[in-house]
Image (cartoon, helix red, strand yellow):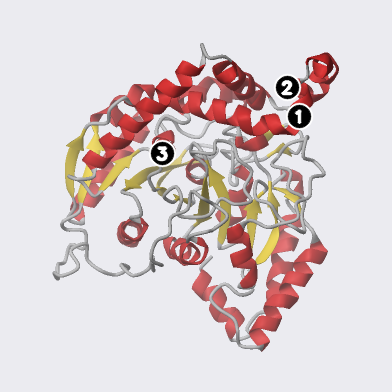
Amino acid sequence: MNLLKLYYLIFFKKIKPFDLSRFILKKIENSLFKNYFINIDYNYIKKQCLYSEKLLLKNKNNLLTGIPTSYKDVFSTKNLKTTSGSRILNNYKTFYNTTFLNKLNNLGVINIGKNNMDEFCVGSNTFNFYFGKTDNSLNKNLTAGGSSGGSVHLVSKNLLPFSIGSDTGGSVRQPSLFNNVIGFKPTYGLISRYGMFSYSSSMDTVGIFSKSILNISIILNTISGFDVKDQTTFNLIKEDYTRYLNKNWLLDKVCFKKLKGLNIGVSKNFFNNIYNFSIRSNIENVLLNFEFLGAKIIFINILFFDFLITIYNIISSSELYSNISKYNNKFLFDKNLFSLNKKSFYNTLSINTKNKFFIGNYLISTNKNKKFFFFSKKIRTLILENFKKNFLICDIIILPTMSCNAWYTLNFNLNKNLIDKFTSVTNLTGLPSINIPSKILNFENFKIFQGFQIIGDYFSEARLIQVIYEYKKNF
């Protein structure tokens, strides 16, 4: 679904925002049993439609007025409950909105509802034991991916032009791969995280789902920027992320091959860690396509690649423990109430959250174990410096999004170590990365989607959008 086409229909009064939202809600009601949503408030949707129609009457509308969307349930909202996919926060209501949500609401964007997710963003299959399991958008036997699995469905079905989730270790890129959608993770600090429930504070980023890279660039223009309430955001000059579209990579020269002069970095470590032949052949085809467009392949070296998952798990588990501990301080710190509250608090958590929670407790509970956390932080800085040096000789880095194809939900535990192998790199370093769908594998009973991942230098989102736009236009 194209944002510009919807804007045309709404601006020239071919369709009203209320009618558009009602059409989507009817489609949603037919698939509510698939657990794509946690919270939907029909009265709140009506109020938003009336506000967007007022903007249209007063000629204060813009590209996003009357456009429907949905958000992951990890973002705070005034008018809807914010559960973060957990039983502990089942009836939790906040008194403020997230910063980017306020920006979109002021422009007249209509929030359809809050999407299902893994509890506290911990997981990779949206197998929520309290709110229900989310199915894949095209095959109910396959997992939807996670933890933002609920946010992808309506975008994949062409019912919403975009949706917003969060990415800590690949929670946007992995479900977008499984549902044939573009998943965009920007540079850490480009979009404000104020109002977002923290999983791992040093790695959490706001991500965008869409089928069109033009939609993503329009949304990024709207929600990016400095925020006084979030100290991790950068105070940079306001940028237009659509400014390089339909231009050559070398902006001063006219050339038939639009990506001539683009240097693509590829590491041998990536190919040595691919366990599926179809994924390896897909990446090789992608590199051939880029060479056809005029790009040049350069081989680079990624340090500590085999230890990335270990470092990611140590840091994320430690930070998750400190973030979740505030929900039950008596259980954690009061020895007298420990035995009384142990069952009630422990049983509310999912299996993945329990594992991460107690690993984090072990890692930072004593001075003896804290050395693991601090040592992993030191290696993280070395990885970051290595990437900075690699970007001196190449413009982008291409790698697989995952080392295995979409799996059955029952076989999830067998593939657990293959999930964050390639996606956690950019969360540790804070670099921007995008998953792009590339190929569809047809089997007897179902289809499996394949894609690849592009990593760019810090704050190079406009150039990444240019590369993806040219690639999708030709292939």
Residue name at image x 51 percent, y 50 percent: 231
**Residue 159 shows in the view:** no
Which mark sits nearer the N-terminus, 1 or 3? 1
Q: Position of residue 357 (x, y in %)?
A: 63, 24
At mark 2, the secondary structure is helix
Residue name at image x 57 percent, y 14 percent: 366
Residue name at image x 70 percent, y 33 percent: 326
C-beta proximity under 8 Å, tags 1 and 3: no
Q: Position of residue 374 (x, y in %)?
A: 44, 23
Give the answer, above or below, for where 474 lies relative to 313. below
Frontmost of labels 1 and 3 is 1
Residue placed under numbered mark 1 in the picture: 328
Residue 182 left/right relative to 39 = left
Give the quarter of the image for residue 304: top left
Q: Position of residue 297 (x, y in %)?
A: 18, 44
Residue placed under numbered mark 2 in the picture: 332
At mark 3, the secondary structure is loop
Residue placed under numbered mark 3 in the picture: 401
Give the answer, above or below, for where 46 lies relative to 383. below
Frontmost of labels 2 and 3 is 2
